[in-house]
Each structure stands twice: as structure tokens, then as C-alpha cells.
Image (cartoon, rainbow, N blue to C red):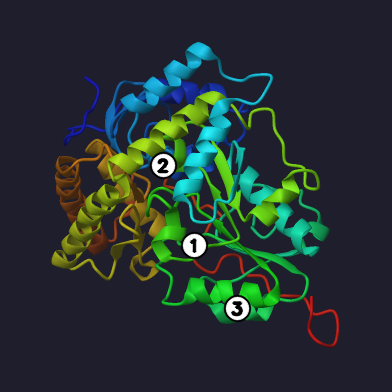
Amino acid sequence: MPNSVRFNPNFPKITASDELYARAAGLIPAYSQTLAKGPTQYVNGVAPKYLQRGKGARVWDVDGNEYLDYNAGIGPISLGYAYKRVDDAIQQQLADGITFSLVHPLEVEVAELLRTILPNAEAVRYGKTGAEVTSAAVRLARAYTGRDNVLCCGYHGWHDWYIGVSARNAGVPQSVKAMVHTFNYNDLDSVRAALDENTACVILEPMVFDYPDPGFLQGLQALCRVNGTLLIFDEMWTGFRWALGGAQEFFGVTPDLACYSKAIANGMPLAVLTGRADVMSLLDEEVFFFSTFGGEALSLAAAQATIYELREQNVPTYLAHIGEQIKEGYNELVAHLGLDHVTQCKGHPARTMVTFAPSAGDPLLLKSLMQQELIRRGILWSGFHNVTFAHTTRDVDYTLMAYRDVLEILKQALRNGRIAEQLRGIPVQPVFRKTSDFHTKPKVAVNGNGRA
């Protein structure tokens, strides 16, 4: 029988997953459309590779194995898989149509709804992916300010303007790379050192896993205003999770532009750019940002239903409550086992990450062993807890019980120095993304005053 959410005597059989994997070889580069979903982020040989369906906080792979899921589709699932109110809205709209030859009323209705909950949403524009709207925001900032340079901190998608600062920058012209620099989170001095009269915008994730230091976001906003630079929040993760109004509401800082996706439509593809009316008005004629599927009605119907549910059920408060139980419970366990120097759980409760200290051993091997053993216990985990409204206290209790067992295995493996030997497959591979020291690139001085 397939494995389920319990201690399973054996690791899951993944025959159908591996057959699909073999068919994808050479056909689909990297095997996946999303790096975080791909086989390099799971123990290859143990973990499933293809999921068939989901319901609530559970997913089933193509071999029929059931898992308690803490990835939430890498963020978009905020309420739960196959959530009735959202699915009903999609089906109702589907009966009328998906994409039309003129503008659909939902484009207005959802924009009006967003204006009531997002502090900076004087105007709204839709896209399909996060990378689309962050790139549109950068283009708008350049047009509005008449400047070229960008300062960024965090991860902002695959387009040339951003990915040129990463290690995976092949194909990006040097001229594009030269216009983008990075700064360190919670380090206003690194911002001051990089800001100049040609800086169009500062774009950052307002929080990844470290909380902003007191005054950091406010100080960043003040620096931007003095310099005539636009401040852009990339709220792919913080939006609709930290608070209904995202990081803007949670931290009390209103950026000039803000970008959203993921949790806004409970899995349907939608991204949103919001901002000041005077900046956004450039989209009328001067800045081109149009797409065939920007007003696709199924996603807008899903977003409308999702936002209503998030608001009526006070979902962000629930996510914080359930996530805090996991975070506190994990850290209490590692303290009790004497492993608090090895591993910790950090971040906002709605989205926490388990970290491993390099001093204890190779963090990827430690993560791989933990992932492997959690999979055996029916938990799909890649180092994060992206909690949803469907996760229950009972799920948390089971998760902490599983962690107790797995941390004991980890402790024994560390004591014996046998982490790698206990892995049943290829360990998790590194990615280019970081949560600190974001590919920091110093300015290149080209004149006497040190300006880039």
C-alpha cells in the first residue's frame, strides 16, 4: 500500500515518479518549470518527483503516497488545496468564459478591493508572474525618475535586470549588469554607499526570514525620498500572509510601488503591481506593460474569493498562530536535545525556515537527512513551513512528534559522523539564492567623486 501521514516502515515507492522523470530527461531542462519544485531540492531516490493532487494541507504523489505539505505550492496556496469557496468562484466564472475580447468587470472589481486593503494601492495593474510585475515596477521607476540604476536586496525573478547580479547570469548583457547593484538587508550604510543621482529605485523583499531592525525600513524610505529614488516592496511572500495588507500594513511603511503574487489567488496565476497614482499613470501611454492574459478572468475570480476569505476568516492571524506553534515547538525540541547550536527555526510564523549551522557539518547534508526521514513519516518538507489556513493544531502536533524522532536520528548521526552514509539517495543541491549577503556587488568608481 502507498505511504500515508504516519511513521511508515519503508520509504515511499516512487516508481511512477521515476518513470516520468526518465521521460522528462532531455525534454524539459532542469526537469521543472520552478527551481524550488525540481528534483535537485529533494533527496533524489527517496522523495517523490511528481504530485498528482491536493486537498487541504495534504498532497498525493503519482504513486498514491500521501504527505502533509509544508511547501504550499512554493507559496501560492494560502487557504489550502481545492478550497471550496475559491474553486466554486473559478467554476462559476468558467461557465461564462476565461479570456475575452474586451475588458472584464472583474478587473475593476478586484482593483477596487485591493485599493481597500493595500495602503499604497492608488492604482493597480495585473500580470501573471512575480517577475513580470517586479520588472514592470523597475521600468516604471526608471521612466518616472529619468534614471537608470537599481539597488536590490532579495530575490526578484528571472528577468535580465535582476538575474544579472546572481551567479546564474549567463546571457545577460554586461551593460545591463552594470546598472544594478545590491545592498545588505538591515544595513543602511550599504544603501548610503550605493545611492547616487542616477539611482531610479531601491527594490527589496521587506522581510525574508530576518526581521527588519527597528527603523530600518523607515530609514530606507527616508533615504529614498531625500535622493529622489522610488522605494519598491517585493511582497511575493509577505503579501496577504504577514497581514491582509502585507508588509506595508505589518511594518507601517508605505512604498511608492509594491508587487504581489503567490497567496493572492490560492494557486491561480496572478500577479499585481500597485502604487502611487502619479507613478502608475505613466502606464497610460508612456510605459508599455500589457499582456494578453493580464485580465484572465478565472484568476481574478479566484483572487476575489481568496481575499474575501482571508479577510472574513482573519487568516493572517491564524497563520501566525499555527506557525508560531511550529516555530516554538521546534526550537524547544532542539534545546531539549542539546542541538540548538546545530539547528534553529526562524522567520515570521507564517513562513519559517529551519537552518543548520555550518560549524556542525555540511548544511545540505543535514537538511537532506532530515528531509529523508520526514518523507518516511509522510511530511513533504524542503526546509520551510509555508503554513496555510488548512493546517491544523493536530497537524502541528504530528509534525513536532515527527521532528522529535528525526532530530534524534540527526543527533546520533552527528555523534557517529555518519550523515552522508545514512542518505538513501542524492542529497539536496545548492541554489544561487541567499537569505543574507545578497550577491553584494560594489559600485565601480569612474570619476573623482566615486560615482558609478
Residue 265 location (% of width, % of height): 45, 35
Q: Looking at the picture, which amino acid does disc 3 mark?
A: Ser
- Tell me what residue is drawn at x 16 percent, y 44 percent: 393
Quarter of the image with the C terminus in it: bottom right
Q: Confirm or deny contact between disc 1 and disc 2 (CB under 8 A).
A: no
Q: x, y (%) of residue 352? A: 34, 55
Element at badge 1? loop
Mark 3: which secondary structure?
A: helix
Q: What residue is shown with label 1?
A: 206
Q: Is 156 displayed left or right of 48 in the figure?
A: right
User: Which residue bears the numbered disc 3?
Assistant: 190
**Residue flagged by tag 1: what amino acid is it?**
Pro
Quadrant position of residue 289:
top right
Q: Earlier in the sequence, mark 3 or mark 2?
A: 2
Side (left or right) of 359 relative to 403: right
Say which mark, if any, is on residue 42: 2
Mark 3 or mark 1: which is in front?
Answer: 1
- Along the line of sight, which residue is nearer the eye, 429 or 324? 324
